[in-house]
Structure formats: structure tokens, C-alpha cells
Image: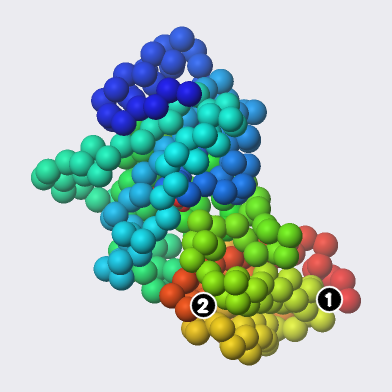
Amino acid sequence: MEVIGNPGVMQQTVKEYLQRGNSIGFVPTMGALHEGHLSLVRRCREENDISVVSIFVNPMQFGPSGDFSRYPRNVEEDMAELSKAGVDILFMPGIEDIYPEGFATYVNVDHLSDKLCGHFRPGHFRGVATVVTKLLNIARPARAYFGRKDFQQFLIIKQLVRDLNLDTETVICPTVREADGLAMSSRNQYLSPEERNAATVIYRTLCEAKKMVISEKITFGEIRSFMERTLAAEPLVDEVQYASAFDPGTLEDISSLNVTIDKYEKEAVLLAIAVRIGSTRLIDNEPVEITGIKGGN
Ligand code: PAF
């Protein structure tokens, strides 16, 4: 595995691969890799000639809470995993490589960035959109891979790729879960054993809500109340930031529509949750496809 830190060197290397007719697949990460990241890497390797992974803990997407300095960093282990996984190039720039003195250009995706996590993390998606635009320009991948757990992030990246005419296909991959259903996340390492146990309420709530919305056909408003109540009943959940049914295209909260799933005119619904357990913010989501439900009992 070739390790490159300098964006200019990376661009030159990529150019040579492209000139030789190779397709490039790209997995952007902030390191502290887990099985979720590795599943993206495997898919990337299957579908492209050359696989590129980036590790860059992007200060621009963190708030002032200090989360940036405490974000887990395991560079040695990450490199060993990526090399074992057969990655061709690891791009690992420093902060000054990405944001040199005088940096003044930002990418902001309107509307989608203000919804869900956007309310609770002002500026977060501007930081994500800016760095991802830069990384895509540097790595010039045919395909870039993202996990479904960060569904809002995926939608925002898809939108910026379209709006800025970037020549990359954005690929969404399934959320990888622990045996008890907790979505894998680098932030899970912050949880104490008790908090880790309590965090299983998130996926449990999503699964129960999904069943209720499909089989009992209760309204999205009732689903929202059920989700909020179930999460709040877990003593270690300190804050329920959102727990509801959303339009998976616009991310509008549809709980106020007062309809059941069979009367909803779109093709899918997104059930999504963000909670704070102690000082750790956790998110998860589950899609509900509507095809086959309409017209049933
Ligand atoms: O999902 C992440 O790890 C980050 O938000 C990303 C896409 C690498 C941008 O910093």
C-alpha cells in the first residue's frame, strides 16, 4: 500500500493511473476504522481497478465542543487493516495540506444541511461538504463509497456531486451492526459498558417502529410519539434529539401529516434517530419501502 500525504503528489499519482485506463474507487474516512469501513473498502476493491482510502480527521466538521481533539485516532492499526484489506493507496494529508494558510472557499448544500443533525451541529455539513468536494477533486474517483448510517451525509454528498458536476458515482452501502444491533461507529468507543448496553435501545426502537408502521398501520405522528417515548424511557439516554419518520428525499419530518403508511404517496419512509447518551451523540436510521404495502390491509 502506497501512503501519500501531499495533495499534489496524490493528484499526480491518480493522473497516471487514469492515463493507463484504470478506474479509481474511493472510501473517505476519518480513521478509527471498524468493520463498517472495511465493508466499504471490500466493495470498493470489487468494483474498481485501484482502491484509494483517505484518513483525515476534518476539523471543519466539528463544533466547538472539543469533539475534534477527542476523536479517536488509531493510525497504526488503521494502516495495518487497510494494507491487509488490499488497499492500493492511503491518502493521509495533514490539516495544513487540506486547509493551507488563506483557505477561503466553502461548499454549502442548502436545505438538506439544515435538517435532522444540522439543527444540532451547526456548520457540520458545510465542513463535510467542503472536505468531500476537495477529496473528490484530488482522488478523482469513478465511484465513492459511503455508509448508510450517515444517510443525511450521503444525501448531501450526492446533491453536491450533482450540483457541481463532479464525475463520480456515489454508492451507499448497508449499515454494519454489532451482534445486538448497535450500528458500528467510531464513537461507540466513548461509551462505558453501561452506556454501550443502553445504546441498544436505538436499533430496537427503529425495528419496533418499522414493524408498527407496516403491520399496524399507525400514523407517522403516533410512530414519532412511540419512538420518543421508548428512547426517553431508557434512563441512560440523556437527550432525544430527533426520533421520527422522514421523507428520505427531502428529509422533511412527516409526522405531522397524520397519515398511515398505506396512504402516504411516496415510495419510502426513513425512520431516523439521534440521541445523546452521556457525552456521546449516536445516530441510526432504517428505511421502510412502501411498495407492496399500499392497498393491503
Ligand atoms: O463519514 C465520515 O467519516 C466523514 O464525515 C467524511 C465523509 C470522511 C468527511 O470527513
Q: Any mark on residue 277, and which?
A: 2
Q: Which label was assigned to residue 95?
A: none
Q: CA distance from mark 2 to mark 1?
A: 30 Å
Label 1 sits on a secondary structure element that is helix
* Residue 125 pos. (x, y %): 37, 59
Q: What is the crowding at mark 2: few (fewer than 14 residues within 10 Å), some, or many (at least 20)? A: many
- Using the image, determine if residue 147 lies above or below residue 290: above
State left or right for residue 210 relative to residue 90: right
Task: Tell me the element at label 2.
Answer: strand
Residue 64 place in picture, x, y as percent: 27, 68
Q: Quick check: 59 left or right of 182?
A: left
The quarter of the image holding the C terminus is bottom right
In this rendering, the answer to whether 97 lies above or below 175 is above
Q: Is residue 179 visible?
A: yes
- In this rendering, which labeled residue sits more in front, label 2 or label 1? 2
Residue at left offset 56%, top offset 83%: 236
For the question of whether residue 268 can be seen, the reply is: no
Q: Are marks 2 and 1 in contact (CB under 8 Å)?
A: no
In the image, farthest residue toward the right: 297
Color theme of the render? rainbow
The residue shown at (39%, 21%) is 14
Question: Which of 26 and 238 lies nearest the eye of the viewer?
Answer: 238
Of 246 and 50, which appears nearest the observer?
50
Q: How many marks?
A: 2
Where residue 13 appears, x then y in whole percent? 36, 18
The residue indicated by pointer 1 is 215
State the residue at coordinates (87%, 71%): 296
